[in-house]
Amino acid sequence: MQGKKTHQESLFIQFQLSDYVPADNFYRRLKSLLDLDFLYPTTLKYYGKEGQKSIDPVVFMKLMLVGYLENINSDRQIVVSSGMRMDILYFLGYDLGQELPWHSTLSRTRKLYGEETFLELFKQVLKLCINNGMINGKRQAVDSALIPANAAKQSMVERIVMEDASVFSRELNDNIEDEPVVPKKPKEGEGNKPDKQGDPDKKNKKVAPVNQTHYSPSDPDARLTTKPGKPMRLYYRAQMSVDTASHCITYIQAFKGNEADKTSLPIMLPQIAGNMAEHAIQVEEILADTGYSSGKAIRALTANGMKGYIPVPGTYKSSREDEGFTYDANYDRYVCIMGVHLTFKRIESAYDDPTVLKRIYESNISDCKNCPFKEICANKKGFKKLVDSADKQLYEYMQRRVESPKGKQMKALRSSTVEPVFGSLINYTNLNRINAKGLKQANKCMLMAAVAYNIKKLLKCKFKPLIAALTTAIIDLETLFNQLSRLGRAYKQSYNANLHLSF
Ligand code: SF4
């Protein structure tokens, strides 16, 4: 007989969330693992002593976490989804039917709390990972990714500082009424010249936005940039270090989109070392790609007591033998195929970065005067100029390390470690776009995404074996208890029998 389910909602039910959320549920395990009570003293400074009560800082942070764990990038959606999930309600400490905080409270509180609150949470989770033996810490792989900002390239406007100054100066001139303005008599031939200001073609011509002349009024910290395979748009850059043993994130920070990796590394290294030093772990090796290579970056490695595996830039030339110039280390000079000396002349700084220094070697005009290769070798002034990096020795030292058998292993290890982690952050922990404005807010978003990633790793790696071990232990205990009961019963029976015989 065919059955048909009829439904009549019960008016009164006895219900307890904890009865319906399984013991091995992700959020139930997370609730018992994560102690966020440190937020109460940390965030106390953001509140006054009177007035309406704020959102509970722990509830706020848990709701933020839910957004990143569930890959939801809308505060409104976080609240809606949380209200429909028994396990999340249990994690938040709410009951069915209990009203959750209003969604706009989340964005207001996110702006209110400083970066240090989010950094503290990141460090707490990192500590849990270290205490659970997940992080070795000695070798870190670093990389960066461009994360789209919450602003459109089309919204960029020209910086108006200079325009303001010129308007002010024009107004000043207009207000000088005492001095009559005598129109200048145009010079001969000048009268027919078109007026630049009045030329409609010039006025209407749109200039392509660049960071030097344009900015986004809605997010002034976002920067226009691109890289192969990415469109030119406004970005932030996420710099991250990942432990090669466990793939846990040990450091993450937001930088402006156009900030080069090589300039960020000296800022990153002390923080990576600091995060590990808090747990008495010394970072020994840093693996990075060519983008991080610079003399300053290599020096920063040494200053922080680390060794690196960073390939030198593709444009760097360790030898000029293929161009026909041999280096003579005794006299610090080059010798060309004609035997002419190119002596060291001076040190120059790079035009785009004054901190990058270059060594200049030049031949004499008189030496090259009659050379048969002059047309293809010498410059227009009639001499040959060679430019070397002032950090040549550092680059050569790094090149030797990278080309060693271990260096080749480290190159493969770096790409297999840090790149998949960025993939996970972007696809599964809500880092495909910064849903806030400003560098500080972007930093908070990145820290939260890293916290969510590390929590997932922590629960996945540690507690599965623990639950399995606990389950086995419980089964063993049950078996032992049954055996003991059986033994007890047998002993009781034999005792009774002996007692009966003795009478
Ligand atoms: S042009 Fe000058 S530097 Fe070049 S090969 Fe001739 S002599 Fe040597």
Image: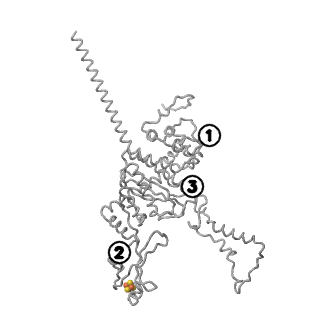
Between 302 and 27, the one lying in front of the other is 302
Where does label 2 land, which residue?
319
Vertical comparison of 441 with 185: above or below:
above
Vertical comparison of 172 with 49: above or below:
below
> Residue 98 appears at what percent x and percent y?
57, 36
Among numbered discs 3 and 2, the one appearing first in the sequence: 2
Give the structural element (helix, strand or loop) at label 1. loop
Which is more foreground, mark 2 or mark 1? 1
Dot label at residue 50: 1
Disc 3 residue type? Lys
Among numbered discs 1 and 3, the one appearing first in the sequence: 1
| Side of 64 where 51 appears, left or right | right
Mark 2 to mark 1 CA distance (whole Å): 71 Å
> Residue 427 appears at what percent x and percent y?
47, 53
> Residue 188 appears at what percent x and percent y?
71, 87
Disc 1 residue type? Glu
| Side of 241 where 496 appears, left or right | left
Which is more foreground, mark 1 or mark 3? 1
Q: Residue at x 57, y 55 (%)?
A: 437
Ligand 1, by image quadrant, is bottom left
Q: How is the image coloured?
A: one colour
Among numbered discs 2 and 1, the one appearing first in the sequence: 1
Where does label 3 land, which residue?
437
Work out which quarter of the rendered image holds the C terminus and state it. Answer: top left
Residue 327 position by quadrant: bottom left
Give the structural element (helix, strand or loop) at label 3. loop
Between 130 and 82, the one lying in front of the other is 130
